[in-house]
Image: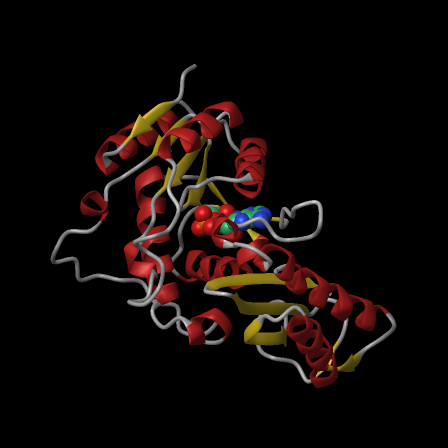
Amino acid sequence: MSMLVITSAEEVQKWAMAQRAQGLRIGLVPTMGYLHAGHLSLIAEAGKHADRVVVSIFVNPVQFGPNEDFEKYPRNEARDLELCEKAGAAVVFLPQVSAMYAPDASVFVTEERLGNGLCGAKRPGHFRGVCTVVAKLFNIALPQVAVFGQKDYQQAAVIRRMVRDLNFPLEVVVAPIVREADGLAMSSRNVYLVGDERSRALGLSRALQTAAQTIAAGPCAAGAVRGQMREVLEKHALKIDYVEIVDAETLEPVSEARQGHVALIAVYCGRTRLIDNRVL
Ligand code: AMP
Protein backbone atom coordinates (compact mmCIF):
# COMPACT_ATOMS: atom_id res chain seq x y z
CA MET A 1 0.00 0.00 0.00
CA SER A 2 1.60 3.27 -1.00
CA MET A 3 1.49 6.31 1.22
CA LEU A 4 -0.93 9.11 0.39
CA VAL A 5 0.15 12.74 0.59
CA ILE A 6 -2.90 14.91 1.09
CA THR A 7 -3.04 18.70 1.35
CA SER A 8 -6.81 19.12 1.74
CA ALA A 9 -8.43 18.77 5.17
CA GLU A 10 -11.69 17.64 3.59
CA GLU A 11 -9.93 14.90 1.68
CA VAL A 12 -8.25 13.57 4.83
CA GLN A 13 -11.62 13.57 6.59
CA LYS A 14 -13.19 11.57 3.75
CA TRP A 15 -10.31 9.11 3.85
CA ALA A 16 -10.60 8.82 7.64
CA MET A 17 -14.34 8.19 7.52
CA ALA A 18 -13.79 5.45 4.96
CA GLN A 19 -11.18 3.78 7.18
CA ARG A 20 -13.47 3.94 10.17
CA ALA A 21 -16.35 2.53 8.12
CA GLN A 22 -14.12 -0.49 7.49
CA GLY A 23 -13.50 -0.85 11.20
CA LEU A 24 -9.89 0.32 10.98
CA ARG A 25 -8.27 2.29 13.80
CA ILE A 26 -6.53 5.54 12.96
CA GLY A 27 -3.48 6.84 14.81
CA LEU A 28 -2.39 10.48 14.47
CA VAL A 29 1.09 11.91 14.94
CA PRO A 30 1.08 15.72 14.73
CA THR A 31 4.44 17.27 13.81
CA MET A 32 5.97 20.43 12.43
CA GLY A 33 8.21 18.44 10.12
CA TYR A 34 12.00 18.38 9.75
CA LEU A 35 11.63 14.90 11.12
CA HIS A 36 14.16 13.12 13.33
CA ALA A 37 14.30 9.84 15.21
CA GLY A 38 12.05 11.27 17.95
CA HIS A 39 9.23 11.78 15.45
CA LEU A 40 9.85 8.35 13.95
CA SER A 41 9.49 6.76 17.38
CA LEU A 42 6.05 8.37 17.65
CA ILE A 43 5.05 6.95 14.26
CA ALA A 44 6.21 3.50 15.38
CA GLU A 45 4.28 3.87 18.64
CA ALA A 46 1.14 4.94 16.76
CA GLY A 47 1.50 1.82 14.62
CA LYS A 48 1.21 -0.31 17.75
CA HIS A 49 -2.14 1.24 18.62
CA ALA A 50 -3.69 1.72 15.17
CA ASP A 51 -4.13 0.09 11.76
CA ARG A 52 -3.46 3.28 9.81
CA VAL A 53 -1.11 6.08 10.86
CA VAL A 54 -1.60 9.67 9.77
CA VAL A 55 1.36 12.02 10.17
CA SER A 56 0.59 15.71 9.93
CA ILE A 57 3.36 18.08 8.94
CA PHE A 58 2.38 21.66 9.56
CA VAL A 59 4.39 24.56 10.92
CA ASN A 60 1.53 26.19 12.77
CA PRO A 61 1.85 29.99 12.70
CA VAL A 62 -0.68 30.44 15.50
CA GLN A 63 1.60 28.85 18.11
CA PHE A 64 4.57 31.10 17.33
CA GLY A 65 5.05 34.49 18.99
CA PRO A 66 5.79 37.57 16.86
CA ASN A 67 9.53 37.44 17.63
CA GLU A 68 9.88 33.67 17.34
CA ASP A 69 11.25 31.51 14.53
CA PHE A 70 8.14 30.77 12.42
CA GLU A 71 9.69 32.12 9.21
CA LYS A 72 13.00 30.35 9.59
CA TYR A 73 11.72 27.12 11.17
CA PRO A 74 13.62 24.34 9.31
CA ARG A 75 11.71 22.62 6.52
CA ASN A 76 12.52 19.68 4.24
CA GLU A 77 9.35 18.24 2.76
CA ALA A 78 10.93 15.75 0.39
CA ARG A 79 13.05 14.16 3.10
CA ASP A 80 10.13 14.14 5.56
CA LEU A 81 7.91 12.31 3.07
CA GLU A 82 10.60 9.71 2.48
CA LEU A 83 11.00 9.13 6.22
CA CYS A 84 7.23 8.87 6.74
CA GLU A 85 6.94 6.33 3.97
CA LYS A 86 9.78 4.24 5.41
CA ALA A 87 8.21 4.49 8.87
CA GLY A 88 4.99 3.02 7.49
CA ALA A 89 2.65 6.02 7.56
CA ALA A 90 -0.54 5.55 5.54
CA VAL A 91 -1.16 9.27 5.04
CA VAL A 92 0.84 12.44 5.38
CA PHE A 93 -1.35 15.49 5.83
CA LEU A 94 0.58 18.46 4.51
CA PRO A 95 -1.68 21.50 4.47
CA GLN A 96 -0.89 25.06 3.47
CA VAL A 97 -1.52 27.69 6.15
CA SER A 98 -4.45 28.96 4.06
CA ALA A 99 -6.03 25.48 4.12
CA MET A 100 -5.94 25.45 7.93
CA TYR A 101 -6.94 29.00 8.80
CA ALA A 102 -9.54 31.13 7.09
CA PRO A 103 -8.39 34.75 6.97
CA ASP A 104 -11.22 35.62 9.38
CA ALA A 105 -10.85 32.55 11.66
CA SER A 106 -12.24 33.54 15.04
CA VAL A 107 -12.58 30.34 17.10
CA PHE A 108 -9.61 29.21 19.21
CA VAL A 109 -9.17 26.67 21.99
CA THR A 110 -7.67 27.76 25.30
CA GLU A 111 -6.65 25.64 28.26
CA GLU A 112 -6.69 27.77 31.38
CA ARG A 113 -4.62 26.02 34.03
CA LEU A 114 -1.83 23.65 32.97
CA GLY A 115 -0.65 25.95 30.22
CA ASN A 116 -0.25 29.05 32.38
CA GLY A 117 3.25 28.42 33.77
CA LEU A 118 6.54 27.24 32.27
CA CYS A 119 6.51 27.62 28.45
CA GLY A 120 3.02 29.13 28.62
CA ALA A 121 4.29 31.99 30.75
CA LYS A 122 7.34 32.53 28.55
CA ARG A 123 5.50 32.14 25.24
CA PRO A 124 2.14 33.93 25.59
CA GLY A 125 -0.47 32.43 23.27
CA HIS A 126 1.65 29.38 22.49
CA PHE A 127 -0.67 26.76 23.96
CA ARG A 128 -3.73 28.51 22.51
CA GLY A 129 -2.12 27.93 19.12
CA VAL A 130 -1.21 24.34 19.99
CA CYS A 131 -4.67 23.44 21.33
CA THR A 132 -6.39 25.05 18.37
CA VAL A 133 -4.33 23.26 15.74
CA VAL A 134 -4.45 19.92 17.54
CA ALA A 135 -8.23 20.15 17.97
CA LYS A 136 -8.48 20.86 14.25
CA LEU A 137 -6.19 17.92 13.42
CA PHE A 138 -8.36 15.65 15.60
CA ASN A 139 -11.44 16.77 13.66
CA ILE A 140 -9.63 16.27 10.36
CA ALA A 141 -7.90 12.90 10.87
CA LEU A 142 -10.56 11.45 13.22
CA PRO A 143 -8.01 9.34 15.13
CA GLN A 144 -8.84 6.85 17.88
CA VAL A 145 -5.33 7.41 19.22
CA ALA A 146 -2.94 10.36 19.03
CA VAL A 147 0.74 10.14 19.96
CA PHE A 148 2.78 12.98 21.44
CA GLY A 149 6.32 13.13 22.80
CA GLN A 150 7.34 13.60 26.42
CA LYS A 151 9.94 16.03 25.03
CA ASP A 152 7.14 18.60 25.22
CA TYR A 153 5.91 17.55 28.67
CA GLN A 154 3.69 20.54 29.28
CA GLN A 155 2.20 20.30 25.79
CA ALA A 156 1.27 16.64 26.37
CA ALA A 157 -0.39 17.56 29.68
CA VAL A 158 -2.33 20.40 28.08
CA ILE A 159 -3.50 18.16 25.21
CA ARG A 160 -4.60 15.40 27.60
CA ARG A 161 -6.62 17.99 29.52
CA MET A 162 -8.18 19.32 26.31
CA VAL A 163 -9.14 15.78 25.27
CA ARG A 164 -10.71 15.15 28.67
CA ASP A 165 -12.48 18.47 29.03
CA LEU A 166 -13.78 18.69 25.46
CA ASN A 167 -14.67 14.96 25.21
CA PHE A 168 -12.57 14.16 22.19
CA PRO A 169 -13.23 10.45 21.59
CA LEU A 170 -9.62 9.33 21.46
CA GLU A 171 -6.75 8.12 23.57
CA VAL A 172 -3.60 10.21 24.08
CA VAL A 173 -0.35 8.26 24.20
CA VAL A 174 2.86 9.97 25.33
CA ALA A 175 6.12 8.44 24.11
CA PRO A 176 9.55 8.80 25.80
CA ILE A 177 12.15 11.38 24.80
CA VAL A 178 14.56 10.18 22.12
CA ARG A 179 18.08 11.48 22.68
CA GLU A 180 21.34 11.70 20.76
CA ALA A 181 24.04 9.31 21.98
CA ASP A 182 25.52 12.06 24.18
CA GLY A 183 22.18 12.87 25.84
CA LEU A 184 20.95 15.89 23.87
CA ALA A 185 17.19 15.58 23.33
CA MET A 186 16.47 15.40 19.63
CA SER A 187 14.77 18.50 18.24
CA SER A 188 14.28 20.01 14.81
CA ARG A 189 15.76 23.17 16.29
CA ASN A 190 19.10 21.45 17.04
CA VAL A 191 20.03 22.25 13.43
CA TYR A 192 20.33 25.91 14.53
CA LEU A 193 23.21 25.06 16.89
CA VAL A 194 26.54 26.30 15.54
CA GLY A 195 30.13 26.15 16.76
CA ASP A 196 30.42 25.30 20.44
CA GLU A 197 26.65 25.61 20.96
CA ARG A 198 26.15 21.92 20.17
CA SER A 199 28.43 20.85 23.05
CA ARG A 200 27.10 23.57 25.39
CA ALA A 201 23.59 22.26 24.75
CA LEU A 202 24.56 19.16 26.72
CA GLY A 203 24.07 21.30 29.81
CA LEU A 204 20.32 20.57 29.72
CA SER A 205 20.53 16.79 29.97
CA ARG A 206 23.43 17.06 32.42
CA ALA A 207 21.48 19.41 34.68
CA LEU A 208 18.53 16.99 34.62
CA GLN A 209 20.91 14.12 35.39
CA THR A 210 22.24 16.05 38.39
CA ALA A 211 18.71 16.61 39.67
CA ALA A 212 17.85 12.93 39.24
CA GLN A 213 20.99 11.88 41.14
CA THR A 214 20.22 14.22 44.02
CA ILE A 215 16.64 12.99 44.28
CA ALA A 216 17.72 9.35 44.07
CA ALA A 217 19.35 9.86 47.48
CA GLY A 218 16.03 11.03 48.94
CA PRO A 219 13.64 14.02 48.93
CA CYS A 220 15.33 17.42 48.84
CA ALA A 221 14.30 21.09 48.97
CA ALA A 222 13.28 22.01 45.41
CA GLY A 223 15.13 25.31 45.65
CA ALA A 224 18.39 23.47 46.33
CA VAL A 225 17.88 21.12 43.39
CA ARG A 226 17.00 24.03 41.11
CA GLY A 227 20.20 25.72 42.28
CA GLN A 228 22.24 22.67 41.32
CA MET A 229 20.62 22.61 37.88
CA ARG A 230 21.24 26.33 37.36
CA GLU A 231 24.87 25.83 38.25
CA VAL A 232 25.28 23.14 35.57
CA LEU A 233 23.45 25.26 32.99
CA GLU A 234 25.58 28.31 33.77
CA LYS A 235 28.75 26.23 33.51
CA HIS A 236 27.67 25.49 29.93
CA ALA A 237 27.08 29.20 29.29
CA LEU A 238 23.35 28.67 28.73
CA LYS A 239 20.92 31.54 29.35
CA ILE A 240 18.18 30.25 31.62
CA ASP A 241 14.57 30.87 30.59
CA TYR A 242 13.22 28.70 33.41
CA VAL A 243 14.25 25.84 35.68
CA GLU A 244 11.35 24.23 37.54
CA ILE A 245 10.40 21.16 39.49
CA VAL A 246 6.69 20.45 39.33
CA ASP A 247 4.04 17.93 40.21
CA ALA A 248 3.69 15.48 37.31
CA GLU A 249 -0.09 15.95 37.02
CA THR A 250 -0.86 19.53 38.08
CA LEU A 251 2.42 21.04 36.83
CA GLU A 252 2.42 23.17 40.01
CA PRO A 253 5.91 23.93 41.38
CA VAL A 254 6.74 21.82 44.44
CA SER A 255 8.68 22.95 47.50
CA GLU A 256 10.11 19.54 48.29
CA ALA A 257 11.38 17.58 45.28
CA ARG A 258 11.05 13.82 45.27
CA GLN A 259 10.79 10.88 42.90
CA GLY A 260 7.86 11.18 40.51
CA HIS A 261 8.16 14.96 40.24
CA VAL A 262 9.26 16.45 36.92
CA ALA A 263 12.24 18.72 36.37
CA LEU A 264 11.84 21.02 33.37
CA ILE A 265 14.32 23.36 31.74
CA ALA A 266 14.17 25.99 29.03
CA VAL A 267 17.32 27.85 28.00
CA TYR A 268 18.74 29.90 25.21
CA CYS A 269 21.85 28.41 23.66
CA GLY A 270 22.98 31.38 21.60
CA ARG A 271 19.75 32.44 19.84
CA THR A 272 18.22 28.97 19.97
CA ARG A 273 15.64 28.15 22.61
CA LEU A 274 15.96 24.57 23.85
CA ILE A 275 13.75 22.64 26.28
CA ASP A 276 14.19 19.34 28.07
CA ASN A 277 12.67 17.53 31.03
CA ARG A 278 12.97 14.43 33.13
CA VAL A 279 10.68 12.56 35.47
CA LEU A 280 12.76 12.26 38.62
P1 AMP B 1 7.53 19.04 16.73
O1 AMP B 1 7.65 18.64 15.29
O2 AMP B 1 8.80 19.48 17.34
O3 AMP B 1 6.37 19.97 16.98
O4 AMP B 1 7.18 17.70 17.52
C1 AMP B 1 6.14 16.87 17.11
C2 AMP B 1 5.95 15.78 18.14
O5 AMP B 1 7.17 15.05 18.27
C3 AMP B 1 5.60 16.32 19.52
O6 AMP B 1 4.66 15.44 20.13
C4 AMP B 1 6.92 16.27 20.23
O7 AMP B 1 6.80 16.14 21.64
C5 AMP B 1 7.54 15.02 19.63
N1 AMP B 1 8.99 15.04 19.78
C6 AMP B 1 9.85 16.05 19.42
N2 AMP B 1 11.11 15.73 19.76
C7 AMP B 1 11.06 14.51 20.36
C8 AMP B 1 12.04 13.64 20.93
N3 AMP B 1 13.33 13.96 20.99
N4 AMP B 1 11.62 12.46 21.45
C9 AMP B 1 10.31 12.12 21.41
N5 AMP B 1 9.35 12.88 20.87
C10 AMP B 1 9.71 14.06 20.36
Is residue 137 shown above or below 167?
above
Residue 3 sits in quarter: top left
Residue 36 image point, x, y percent = 53, 40
- Give the residue at x 18% y 46%: 98
Position of the N terminus by quadrant: top left
- In the image, 62 versus 145, the foreground residue is 62
- Is residue 264 in view from this perspective? yes
Q: Residue furthest front?
A: 195
Position of the C terminus by quadrant: bottom right
Q: Is residue 243 left or right of residue 224?
A: left
- Is residue 174 in view from this perspective? no
Is residue 33 shown above or below 4?
below
Residue 127 image point, x, y percent = 39, 64
Q: How many marks?
A: 0
Is residue 34 shown above or below 174?
above
Residue 76 image point, x, y percent = 38, 37
- Give the residue at x 42% y 25%: 90
- In the image, 112 versus 253, the foreground residue is 253
What colour scheme governs how the chains and residues are painted in the rendered image of this protein?
secondary structure
- Give the residue at x 58% y 48%: 186
Q: Is residue 254 left or right of residue 64?
A: right
- Give the residue at x 29% y 56%: 61
Q: Is residue 15 left or right of residue 55?
A: left
Residue 243 sits in quarter: bottom right
